Amino acid sequence: MEYIPYGKHDINEDDIQAVVDVLRSDYITQGPKVPEFEKAVATYTGARYGIAVNSATSALHIACLALGVGQGDVVWTSPITFVASANCAIYCGANVDFVDIDPDTYNMSPNKLRDKLIEAKANNNLPRVVIPVHLAGQSCQMKEIFELSKEFGFSIIEDASHAIGGKYRGRPIGCCEYSAITIFSFHPVKIMTTAEGGMAMTNDEKLANKMNLLRTHGITRNEELMSRKDGQWYYEQIDLGFNFRLTELQAALGISQLSRIDEFVTARNNVAERYIELFAGSNVQTPKLREECLSSYHLFIVRIKNRNLVFNKLRKAMIGVNIHYIPVYKQPYYAKYNYNTASFRCANEYYDTAISLPLYPTLEFTAQQKVVSLILGNNI
Ligand SMILES: Cc1ncc(COP(=O)(O)O)c(C=O)c1O
């Protein structure tokens, strides 16, 4: 029986050649490909700056630091996300809290965000940063969240790890129209890949410079930023940064993959459409997309009553279904924060019934039919 994973990268001969060309060149790290990749993603999304890093986790970390997140601050995100969306605040010494999800989109609910902000204002505990996560590739309701950011005075980092290639209100996700920073992931199960990798997009020059500095140890060669001048060898460490650099090999792969991004997104939407048709008339709840959104369909999440039975049955049949995600507040590491987990009603209900089905550009119709008939079959 052939294994069908839930996600899979799509590497072609051009991608391979791009990487091989770098291997034969003078630079395998810190050369011209990384800035070329950054520029290409900036052009594609419409953002002014892109800072390429070795993962979306690193992008979230330096985005929080650039926005001044530190001890005593609070960062809010969605509970239905990968742990990295929350961990980034803890890396900075801040606390994390969660905003319950919308029952239709599974993204952070703007209404619940508003309610929580009103309460936090009364308790003098407003968040410094809110991180909406575009789950499965569908944008959050960024306009509403942006308006709340103006009213309550917080910054926004869009976690668009799932969402490069998607659109919101006619503009590419990543353009940062409604946020200070948007981050992408290029992990192989995502829409496009650099093996490991990520990027932080922004329209703010100061944030771009800060993230650039933090990516490379906090070291600068810019004379205007240095305390004194010395020989040509001279550099200064002016901040505490990290080695979060992407390599030239990865950047070359990223440039090549980006040239097919719209193809990937169209193929993913086609696969999603076929699932929706196959499930029509059944009691399986397929994704609900808001009309202002084009999803990049990183994931195809359905809601199903007897989810655990279905999960086990599909795994037994060599179908790599998965659960995205275990609510972050349920993780043992987060127990010490003593969240009132019952208050995340929609996230809890979601977790009991959600399952991600295989979705990638080359997934064949016959494989989809098999997945659907196993789910709908009366011997579940
Ligand atoms: C929503 C979300 N945020 C952040 C990340 C972290 O991405 P990376 O693996 O590139 O660090 C992931 C990865 O799965 C994710 O799904």
Image (cartoon, rainbow, N blue to C red):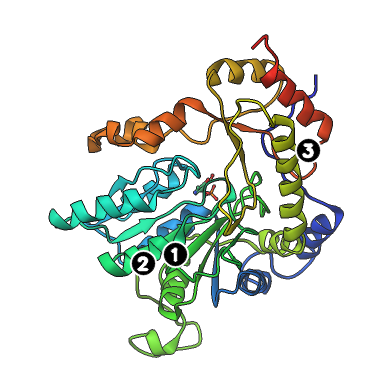
Q: Reply above or below: 1 against 360.
A: above
Provide the residue designation for mark 3. Answer: 363
Task: Check mark 2 vs ligand 1: CB closer than 8 Å? yes or no.
Answer: no
- Please tell me which residue is depicted at 46% across the width and 88% down the height of the picture: 231
- Please tell me which residue is depicted at 76% across the width and 31% down the height of the picture: 368
The quadrant of the picture occupied by the C terminus is top right
Provide the residue designation for mark 1. Answer: 143
- Mark closer to the chain start, 3 or 2: 2
Mark 3 or mark 2, which is nearer to you?
2
As helix, strand or loop, the secondary structure at mark 1 comes to helix
As helix, strand or loop, the secondary structure at mark 3 comes to loop
* Crowd band around label 1 with a 10 angstrom C-alpha radius: few (<14), some (14–19), many (20+): some
Q: Is residue 337 in view?
A: yes
Provide the residue designation for mark 2. Answer: 147
How far apart are labels 3 and 2 at the CA level?
Answer: 39 Å
127 to the left or right of 136: left
The three-letter code of the residue at mark 3 reads Leu
- Mark closer to the chain start, 3 or 1: 1
Q: Which mark is residue 315?
A: none
The three-letter code of the residue at mark 2 reads Glu
The three-letter code of the residue at mark 1 reads Lys
- Please tell me which residue is depicted at 46% across the width and 57% down the height of the picture: 141
Position in image of residue 32 (x %, y %): 67, 74
183 to the left or right of 33: left
Quarter of the image for residue 19 reads bottom right
Position in image of residue 57 (x %, y %): 48, 52
Answer whether labels 1 and 2 touch (C-beta < 8 Å): yes
Name the residue at the left extreme: 123
As helix, strand or loop, the secondary structure at mark 2 comes to helix
Answer whether labels 3 and 2 touch (C-beta < 8 Å): no
The quadrant of the picture occupied by the N terminus is top right
Position in image of residue 14 (x %, y %): 84, 59
